[in-house]
Image (tube, helix red, strand yellow):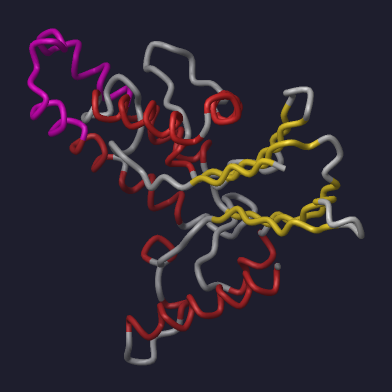
């Protein structure tokens, strides 16, 4: 499976260089301008009886893998290295909101259009920080991601897990991660996200997140970098 990911990474490199043309190499393209993607992938292995007995997994970026066991406990397999980097930018935006509201009318008196305009301004103000974070990809200071660089191979997480007492397998992109309210302390929400997915299913998780995002188009009540993000998820019952 790792070989397949490396092959895809090579294809991405060729596509990126072809897109820029004029014999531009990937190394000449700044990291923050490259196409990139995260992933969480598994291969289910079966024993001689035809039962699912283990998985091989591989991941990059902020796509996540969880297992739930027959006693309803669950385990987080992968780690979101991007969250802490985005969190620094989100905290800066939150401080900007706090400073703005000290000299502004009550939040209830500000139109949605004005709130969205302010969020875009605050987002633009942290663009340099976001670019700095992107430039840390595939390094020990940042995170692993598929971007066409051969170095990506060395920052993949992968392994083999026996499916002992495992009932469910869950794979998620960060667009299906629950949001934390601004008045709550920033917390690890991947675990609560997985718990909700295991308990209610992916469709309910998606509806819940979209409802929050549509109620908060300016990313004020639930601080985040953009209103919506790509939502992908797979929930497998064994």
Q: Main secondary structure of the magenta part?
A: helix
Residue drawn at 33 percent across, 32 percent down: 210
Q: Looking at the image, how many numbered discs can be counted on the residues?
A: 0
Q: Nearer the viewer, residue 205 or 80?
A: 205
Q: Nearer the viewer, residue 164 or 124?
A: 164
Residue 108 lies in the magenta stretch: yes
> If the image is split into quadrants, where does the C terminus sit?
top right
The quarter of the displayed image where residue 145 is located = bottom right
Report whether 162 appears left or right of 76. right
120 in relation to 102, above or below: below
User: Does 8 appear in magenta?
Assistant: no
Q: Residue at x 19, y 19 (%)?
A: 100
Give the quarter of the figure containing the N terminus: bottom right
Residue 91 lies, in percent from the top left, at 40, 27
Please name the residue shown 90% across and 56% down the image. 49
Residue found 38% across the figure and 45% down from its top: 129
The residue segment tinted magenta is 94-119
Residue situated furthest bottom in the rendering: 23
Of 1 and 236, the residue lying toward us: 236
- Quadrant position of residue 4: bottom right
Q: Position of residue 72 (x, y in %)?
A: 73, 23
Going by the picture, which residue comes out furthest to the front?
A: 49
């Amino acid at each position: 499976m790792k070989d397949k990911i490396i092959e895809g990474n090579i294809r991405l490199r060729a596509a990126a260089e072809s897109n820029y043309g004029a014999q531009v190499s990937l190394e000449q393209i700044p990291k923050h301008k490259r196409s990139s993607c995260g992933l969480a992938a598994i291969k289910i292995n079966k024993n001689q009886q035809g039962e699912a007995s283990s998985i091989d997994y591989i991941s990059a970026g902020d796509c996540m893998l969880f297992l739930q066991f027959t006693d309803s406990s669950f385990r987080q397999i992968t780690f979101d290295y991007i969250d802490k980097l985005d969190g620094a930018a989100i905290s800066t935006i939150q401080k900007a909101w706090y400073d703005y509201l000290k000299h502004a009318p009550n939040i209830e008196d500000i139109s949605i259009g004005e709130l969205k305009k302010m969020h875009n301004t605050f987002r633009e103000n942290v663009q340099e920080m976001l670019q700095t974070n992107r430039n840390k990809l595939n390094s020990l200071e940042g995170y692993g991601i598929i971007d066409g660089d051969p170095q990506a191979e060395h920052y993949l997480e992968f392994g083999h897990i026996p499916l002992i007492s495992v009932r469910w397998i869950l794979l998620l992109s960060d667009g299906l991660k629950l949001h934390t309210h601004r008045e709550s302390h920033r917390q690890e929400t991947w675990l609560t996200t997985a718990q909700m997915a295991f308990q209610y299913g992916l469709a309910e998780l998606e509806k819940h997140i979209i409802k929050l995002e549509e109620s908060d188009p300016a990313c004020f009540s639930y601080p985040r970098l953009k209103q919506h993000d790509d939502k992908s998820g797979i929930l497998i019952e064994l």
